[in-house]
Amino acid sequence: MPTVEHDVMAELFRFEPALAVALLRDVLRLPMPPFTSFDLPDTSFTQTMVTEYRADGVVALLDAHGLPVLGIIIEIQRGIDERKLWSWPVYAASLRARMKCPVEVLVLCLDEATALWARAPVVLGSRGSWAPLVVGPGILPAIRDPGEAARLPEMAVLSALAHGNNEGGLDTVLAAIVALARLDDERARIYHDLILARLNERVRRALEAMMLQKFEYQSEFARKYYGQGKQEGFAEGLAQGEARGKAEGKAEGKAEGKAEGKAQAILAILAARGMDVPFDLRETILRCQEEEQLDRWVIAATSAAQARDLVAGRPGSGPGAPGGGK
């Protein structure tokens, strides 16, 4: 029976179809046909006198004329299920007949035992066999660079899910969380909850310690979501800011809440890296309401040698910016 984790992982592909291409092309090194756009066809494969089959997701690559050039069937597999060895070939044959183009079945697994099972060829008859394309944690990249994570946040989320509980996995979690600042509130919240639910207690405690280290809370957002020991992170701050803006009936309330969440994220990253943030610098970051500037500081915070180097000598470091003039 599908779980919340299963359903949310399937949502990754509906939110961002390019994730399917990235897994096939960049992880499995499969050549991709030229295409210009995506489509999300129906996921059911009903055949006459046969029980309905339904995949977790389908992504179609379309050419410049809107014709399909490749169909990608998405399956989220959280454990071994022998029934899938009968249904997966049906998915492929049905979609191929419907779309009149090549089709691949992409199986995403978060444990290596399931991935190893899924890769085994399925015997179709005396003259041939078939196998899906399988991505497991062993070949999923461990994305630790926030800049790389921001280019495709959904891939960063998969990286955190696959590697977050491993040695050094906190870096993949932090990179994914930073990337969420660029997404809309709904996606950020869904992805953030998915990552936290996957982490074991040891890693969750370590993550909480990193986010709380040397961090002085001076806002309602921080007190509510960190000061009380909750681990929702700054993506919750974005959603909370939106709710506050709606409650007050003011558009500026929403904008201020989002800016506040990003400012708190910057301070949390600096704290997690063991940096002391001078009072004047902290105040300047918290007062900033320019989301583009805050986005730049979020990325800079992950690599700055010291807090005052956050924007020193870079665009946006002029008057009114941390380290800038008066």
Image (spheres, rainbow, N blue to C red):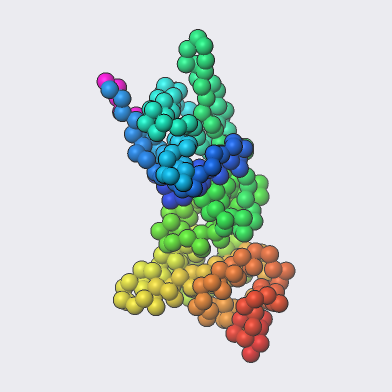
The picture quadrant where one finds residue 324 is bottom right
Identified at 34% across, 30% down, the residue is: 45
Seen as rendered, the residue at the extreme right is 305
The picture quadrant where one finds residue 44 is top left
Identified at 44% across, 76% down, the residue is: 256
- In reply to whether residue 50 is colored magenta, the answer given is yes
Query: Could you say where residue 102 lies in the image, as x and y percent from the top left?
Result: 48, 31
Query: Could you say where residue 204 lies in the image, as x and y percent from the top left?
Result: 54, 53
Point out the stretch of residues depicted in magenta: 49-53
Asked whether the viewer can see residue 100, the reply is: yes
Query: Could you say where residue 69 lies in the image, as x and y percent from the top left?
Result: 47, 37
Asked whether the viewer can see residue 84, the reply is: no
Looking at this view, is 243 or 220 the one in front? 243
Identified at 40% across, 58% down, the residue is: 186
Query: Could you say where residue 145 lies in the image, as x and y percent from the top left?
Result: 64, 56
Q: Main secondary structure of the magenta part?
A: loop
